[in-house]
Amino acid sequence: MSSRQPGVERRGRGRKRVTSERLSLALLLGVVLAAVQGCGQDMPAVTLRGDRFDPVRSLIEETIREHGLASVAVAAAQDGEVVWEEAFGWADRENRVPATPNSIYALASISKSLTATGLMVLVERGLIDLDRPVNDYLGDAKLISHVGDPAEATVRRVLLHTAGLPSHHNIFFEDELVRPPEQDESIRRYGMIVDQPGREFVYSNFGYGVLDRAISNVTGMSYAEFMEAEVFEPLGLTHTSVFPDPALREHSVSHYDGRSTVPGLDFDHVGASAIHSSVHDLIRYGMFHLGNEVPGQERILSGETIDLMHEPSDATMPEEILEVRLGLGWAIIDLEEVRMVNVTGGMPGTVTRLALIPAENAAVAIMINSGVGDSYAPWEIELATFAAMIPDLPSGPEIVAKREPTPPLPDELRGTWRGSIRTHLGELPASLSFGDGRDMELEIDGRKTAPVRVRSPLGGARFKDGVFEAPFFGTIETDDALRSGHVLFLRLREHGDKLSGVAAAVAMNQSFWLPYWTELRKVSNDSDSR
């Protein structure tokens, strides 16, 4: 398959220059983010000092010092060859085990791209149709619809995060006593359509958990068995598995939150988050998606299918700097005549990136076994690595996203709205009252609570495009949500005299974001009725 995109000239054929600012923005928006040993017999690592990647090495070493990272592994490929792969720092800080390009990191959300690739294998075989309802491929537990027709939640829309599913993640730490429920039980609890399918992009880990259930139901294999047999093995990804492979334990890194080691993680959305891999394998996966003939790889998908996965849809991420559109398991940014295709991952103790510039037949993979907060460090490393391969793409200035001031809440919200929050254990009576300015109060099952006004990643109260969002203090006392201290996050769409959507329990330790269907009707325009 050719990696060339329509209308894009390859290097050496009059390709247009990409401005530094635009390339910097593109790399930043990929985020809704040592010694070498045994690098694979078919493709040995290139780690010569004094080469064009020296500035990137210096940047990585500075980044490790500045942010206290345990390790950074990076790989770069161009024109069908790995031109650089190297690891810096510690795979295991306590035992002084150096990271290598074969060290195995948790991929976090890059798992979604691999899951999408596996699913497209079944599409090519005629076993799954992208435009049929995903429910057609599930077992006894199916998505239920609070809004619209569940048949409109198609496989394609689940891949694009536009099926009307709410935001959701559910992480179980290895040292917890509680384990994830059976997958069908999770679907019964959280497999709900809360907005009109196709209306908008809402990032949903749970959707990719639904897809991994569809894969196992259609094939009769477990998701892990299918991915090993149909994706990892034929692509020659020998250091890649769903959850850590005990046979490769010596290569597994420790993940860190600051100085603390993060326990192993489990999920109720395995297909969204559970794949582990090395940077050596990840760059080979990127080369496959560029259409390169890589030694030891089979062509598990046709060039036409890969092009389809990279084709931007109408679904867009809610980014304010630059438009980011969604493909099938990938994010796509068009800059002038250059298309960027990328995926990112982040969860406790993990930051990962894989970015492709198809017009240059170039890819960069980055893995970090530490959290980096809101830092742009991974994107800066990625940009510098691309610049080393493509000298006429300037590095560009540092770009910092600007936050627009939050407008006041509209008058139509003023008053009291009453209804209920529905959980798998039953309904909870709820009311939401708005007064002057930003004065508001939430009451659940007779317990009153106020909005969270301190600065947090959840942001403040806002109303945009007919949707009200706000964090509140408070709890939802289900067995799932009581695993950890949490706050509440409301996301409700206005429909005249009705607000509907979800109240989510958001864990303070980042372990879960659990949505519960919420429907409220306006009963008074007088805020004093509280």
Image (tube, grey):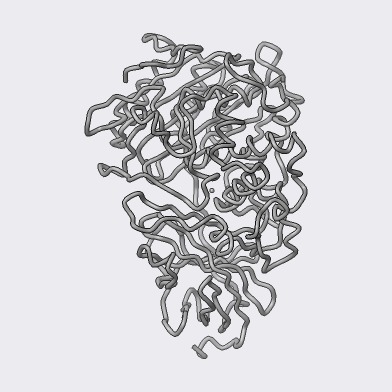
Which residue occupies 45% across, 55% down?
180
Q: Position of residue 42 (x, y in %)?
A: 51, 12
Number of numbered tags placed on the structure image: 0
Q: Is residue 352 above or below residue 201?
A: above
Q: Is residue 394 above or below residue 109?
A: above
Q: Is residue 311 left or right of residue 251?
A: right
Q: Position of residue 300 (x, y in %)?
A: 67, 26
Which residue occupies 68% across, 17% down?
10
Residue 248, visible in the rendered structure:
yes
Query: Image quadrant for the N terminus?
Result: top right
Q: Position of residue 3 (x, y in %)?
A: 68, 21
Q: Nearer the viewer, residue 305 or 87?
A: 305
Which residue occupies 45% across, 16% down?
40
Q: Nearer the viewer, residue 73 or 409?
A: 73
Residue 434, visible in the rendered structure:
no
Residue 4 picture quarter: top right
Q: Position of residue 378 (x, y in %)?
A: 43, 34
Residue 522 picture quarter: bottom right
Q: Is residue 237 left or right of residue 230?
A: left
Q: Residue furthest bottom?
A: 529
Q: Is residue 4 above or below residue 305?
A: above
